[in-house]
Image (cartoon, grey):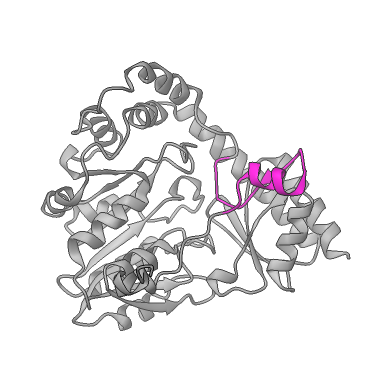
Amino acid sequence: MGMDWASRIRKAVHRLKPYVPGKPIEEVQRELGLTEVVKLASNENPLGPSPKAIEAAMKVLPEAHRYPDDSYFRLRQKIASVYNVPPDWVLLGRGSDEILLHIVQTFVEPGDEVVFSTPSFVMYDILSTLMDAVCVKVPLRDYIHDVAGLLEAISERTKIVFIDNPNNPAGTILRDRAVRSLLDEIPEGVIVVLDEAYAEFVESQDYPKSLDYVREGYPVIVLRTFSKAYGLAGLRVGYGFARTEITQHLLKVREPFNVSSIAAAAAEAALDDTEFLERVRKTVWTSKRLMYRGLEQLGLRYVPTEANFVLIDVQRPAKEVANALLRKGIIVRPCEPFGLLTHLRVDIGTPETAECFINALKSVLSV
């Protein structure tokens, strides 16, 4: 008889719902026999990596048989210099997802509570559940984090409050005054994680300068990534900031050599290519306005965004619309997993892909 492995698995694992990413282009081409496919489902950089990052990665490839410098001295120094912080405040991970994992591994005991908004980045739920935490979810209010609701949800058992800013999938932000009001009311012993994966795309002038909170001694961990604006999603490099009294403990759970030498070299070069980053930002901002105009002409409601994606209410089952778009070679993200049954989350790519999406959506909705 075969072993009943399900009975041997941790109960927390049974409670997990696996993360479902957007379909790869190759899979859609293979399944539907399409040659031209536009992927607008994973909030990716429409221009790819910086040429300088590609060149730096290529230079390191011949040394791929050697382990990286486990201190990541060069990258850590570069990040510290760009953001004007001490190098020992800098955290590195295989994407910011891994730093999120380090945070829950370090601070969360079974039965502890973590607080976050719903909907928000699904990894808060997955990683906290994996650690046997109790996930306390506070609904967004008008698609924005509800500061009063988050504070009210905190109890004596709360260890962490996660805030994705901009929020995923809404693209909205908490402004500086709102974040400070939350931090001023946070009980002692609770850590606030400000996940700023899309910060480079924000246009608002009162977006929080979150490193000021760290400098001022608030119990804050700030996360960033090279996956989005810097176009290095395939290399998996995330980074973050916290005061030494926090980072020294997070480093204890970090696996050795957790960022590849190729990824580290590309990330360092990407930080230097400020002209490319600005071109990415301007491309997204231009495309965003084209998307808005097209959606308004279709009479559709959308959430004004500060990220490189937009949340759209298509006013009918989103999964059906997403499948119809897929048959036209357009990959988008239906937001049913977020509890938004009539919403799509769509990347803001180039002006060309924005026009392509609007035309395809118009055709689908007219049927």
Q: Quadrant of residue 110?
A: bottom left
Residue 177 seen: no
Q: As drawn, is 169 to the left or to the right of 366? A: left
**How many dots with numbers?**
0
Residue 26 visible? The answer is: yes
- Left/right of residue 331 with respect to residue 275 in the rendered view: right
Question: Which residue is at a point 51% across and 29% down the rendered structure image?
Answer: 276
Report the residue at 41% width, 40% height from top: 226
Quadrant housing residue 145:
bottom left
228 on left or right of 366? left
Asked if 213 appears above or below 125 in the picture, the reply is above
Residue at the outermost front position = 1
User: Closest to the observer: 85 or 230?
Assistant: 230
**Residue 35 lies in magenta, yes or no?**
yes
User: Is the residue 350 above or below the residue 219 in the image?
Assistant: above
> Which quarter of the rendered picture does the C terminus lie within?
bottom right
Specify whether residue 106 is painted magenta.
no
Judge whether 98 appears above or below 113 on screen.
Answer: above
Residue in the picture at 15% in, 72% down = 188
Residue 95 lies in quadrant: top left
Q: Quadrant of the N terminus?
A: bottom left
Report the front residue among 115 and 334: 334
| Extent of the magenta region | 22-45
